[in-house]
Image (cartoon, helix red, strand yellow):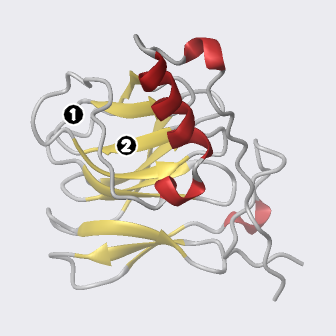
């Protein structure tokens, strides 16, 4: 088995984009950027408001383009956070109802797969065109799965909640990747 590393480009903020009112704040901001010891400190910052209400999302996955895709639970839409500019966008509607998904995983073809909780179908978000597709039916009762993970063979595995079975989605060996350089460190390659 050959493992490939995933690389994500991250651009540090430009000096003119650092908002401060005093020289001390500027020095502190620069220290936060360039002091690698500070990166290990526990910090929390509130991001943008999503406006989707309570219990909107449960779970998220990093898309190949660097955006973070939120699995819609009680939100009617896929959630999209862009860390490059700290913005939130309400993505496409999924139409699967309340309590739809709990968990997300990036598939080898670059799509984000949502673990169906109360949805009858697997959820599929394609970051290459910002589209949502209702995937295959899983045939389980409500509250079926909670969480998703990518297996080394490229399948997405759903953790059972009220389902008596482990959920298994996909055979990505025959799928063309919309993101040519999309790799996952745990997916086998030849």
Above/below status of 174 relative to 65: below
Residue 186 rendering spot, x and y as whole percentages: 66, 76
Q: Which mark is residue 12?
A: none
Looking at the picture, tell me which residue is in the foreground, 39 or 28: 28
Which label's residue is closer to the chain start, 1 or 2? 2
Q: Say which residue appears at 66% left-offset and 49% top-offset.
A: 110
Can the viewer see residue 126? no
Looking at the picture, tell me which residue is in the foreground, 39 or 153: 39
Can you identify the residue that label 2 sits on? Answer: 70
Residue 38 rendering spot, x and y as whole percentages: 48, 54
Q: Say which residue appears at 14% left-offset and 62% top-offset.
A: 142
User: Residue furthest toward the left?
Assistant: 54
Q: Quadrant of the C terminus?
A: bottom right
For label 2, the SS is: strand
Residue 118 quadrant? bottom left
The answer to whether residue 136 is left or right of residue 153 is left
Looking at the picture, tell me which residue is in the foreground, 14 or 71: 14
Can you identify the residue that label 1 sits on? Answer: 75
User: Residue furthest toward the bottom?
Assistant: 1
Marks 1 and 2 close (CB-CB < 8 Å):
yes
Above/below status of 150 relative to 52: below
The answer to whether residue 90 is left or right of residue 56 is right
Q: How many numbered marks, from 0 up?
A: 2
The answer to whether residue 53 is left or right of residue 185 is left
Neighbourhood count class around disc 2 (C-alpha, 10 Å): few under 14, some 14–19, many 20 upward:
many
Q: Say which residue appears at 22% left-offset and 59% top-offset.
A: 117
Q: CA distance from mark 1 to mark 2?
A: 10 Å
Q: Say which residue appears at 64% left-offset and 19% top-offset.
A: 15
Label 1 or label 2, whichever lies nearer to me, is 2
For label 1, the SS is: loop
Residue 155 rendering spot, x and y as whole percentages: 58, 72
The answer to whether residue 109 is left or right of residue 130 is right
């Amino acid at each position: 088995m050959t493992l490939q590393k995933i690389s994500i480009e991250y651009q540090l903020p430009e000096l003119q984009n650092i908002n401060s009112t005093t020289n001390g704040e500027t020095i502190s901001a620069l220290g936060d950027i360039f002091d690698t010891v500070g990166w290990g400190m526990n910090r929390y910052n509130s991001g943008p408001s999503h406006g989707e209400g309570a219990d909107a999302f449960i779970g998220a996955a990093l898309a190949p383009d660097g955006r973070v895709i939120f699995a819609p639970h009680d939100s009617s839409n896929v959630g999209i956070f862009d860390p490059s500019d700290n913005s939130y966008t309400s993505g496409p509607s999924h139409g699967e109802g309340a309590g739809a998904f709990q968990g997300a995983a990036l598939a080898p073809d670059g799509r984000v797969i949502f673990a169906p909780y109360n949805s009858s179908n697997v959820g599929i978000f394609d970051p290459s065109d910002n589209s949502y597709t209702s995937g295959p039916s899983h045939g389980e009762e409500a509250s079926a799965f909670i969480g998703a993970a990518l297996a080394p063979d490229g399948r997405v595995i759903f953790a059972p909640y009220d389902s008596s079975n482990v959920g298994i989605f996909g055979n990505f060996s025959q799928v063309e990747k919309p993101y040519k350089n999309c790799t996952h460190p745990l997916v086998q390659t030849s």
